[in-house]
Amino acid sequence: MTKFGYIPLGLMVLMAMLFAPACSGGGKKEVMLEGKTMGTTFHITVVTEADTSGLEAAIHRRLAEINQSMSTYDPESEISRFNRMREVGRPFPVSSDFLQVMTVAAELHELTGGAWDGTVSPLVNLWGFGSRKSAPRIPDPKEIEALLPEVGFRHITVSRDGALKKSLATVSVDLASIAKGYGVDQVASVIAAAGIEDFLVEIGGEVYARGRRPDGGPWRIGINTPKPSAGRAEIY
């Protein structure tokens, strides 16, 4: 009741319909951020009311740090310089990012009994899926056999003091199978630190989802065909 009398029920319902969106935080919207990193692409969706220019800059900085550390597509990255190094037993100081991923790599190699091996870079390039620009192909078994002596994570020592060592001069590392996942986790941390609770991060097929879409529904992730001509899987 107001000083002018009772409010009609119909008017009350109309007022509720008009003001409900404003009262329920309806100002949030989806903002999409896209770019390239680690030889692939990234797609990020955040749900927020705030301006995202500062967040976008922070994400790009973090991805640039990780790319400079573990991208085999950058000849001056840490991993590329380590792969070129030929001094056996020489300590190669690495960043915190590289050390964390290499520590996990060593654990994965042990847990899988060698089924996962981060030193298969020569074979990846031979098949045409690596950083070297070559057409995918099925190599001759003799070509594979010739490269096998260069493969073996046992030829790398990961020291807790932040350095790597080689026991085989030609051994090289390819962390593509886990480095992108690390990048996804790091970007998710950047977004969460900005106070955003609803977001989706995808880097080269690795996905991290938190919260919900603006309509309250769950995030939906599609899987595309592995053909080279296929586009990006639908993620929304």
Image (cartoon, rainbow, N blue to C red):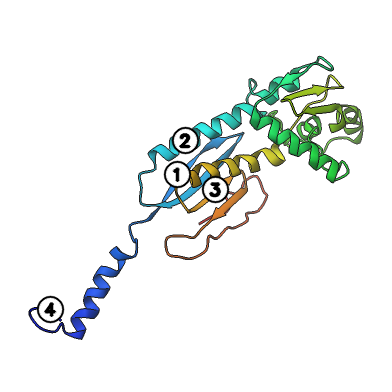
Q: Tell me the kind of residue under disc 1.
A: Ala
Mark 4 vs mark 2, foreground winner is 4
Q: Residue at x 75, y 35 (%)?
A: 103
Q: Are marks 3 and 4 in contact (CB under 8 Å)?
A: no
Return the x and y of residue 216 as percentages of the image width and height.
45, 65
Q: Residue at x 60, y 30 (%)?
A: 67
Cα distance, mark 2 to mark 1? 10 Å
Disc 1 or 3, which lies upstream in sequence?
A: 1
Tell me the SS state at disc 4: loop
Cα distance, mark 3 to mark 4? 50 Å
Tell me the SS state at disc 3: strand
Decide if residue 25 is on the left or right side of residue 57. left
Mark 1 vs mark 3, foreground winner is 1
Mark 1 vs mark 4, foreground winner is 4
8 or 32: nearer the viewer? 8
Q: Is residue 81 visible?
A: yes
Q: Are marks 2 and 1 in contact (CB under 8 Å)?
A: yes
Mark 3 vs mark 4, foreground winner is 4
Q: Tell me the kind of residue under disc 2.
A: Ala
Disc 3 or 4, which lies upstream in sequence?
A: 4
Q: Tell me the kind of residue under disc 4.
A: Thr
Res. 91 image quadrant? top right
Tell me the SS state at disc 2: helix
Residue that badge 1 annotates = 194
Q: Residue at x 37, y 56 (%)?
A: 28
Residue that badge 2 annotates = 58
Residue 2 circle label: 4
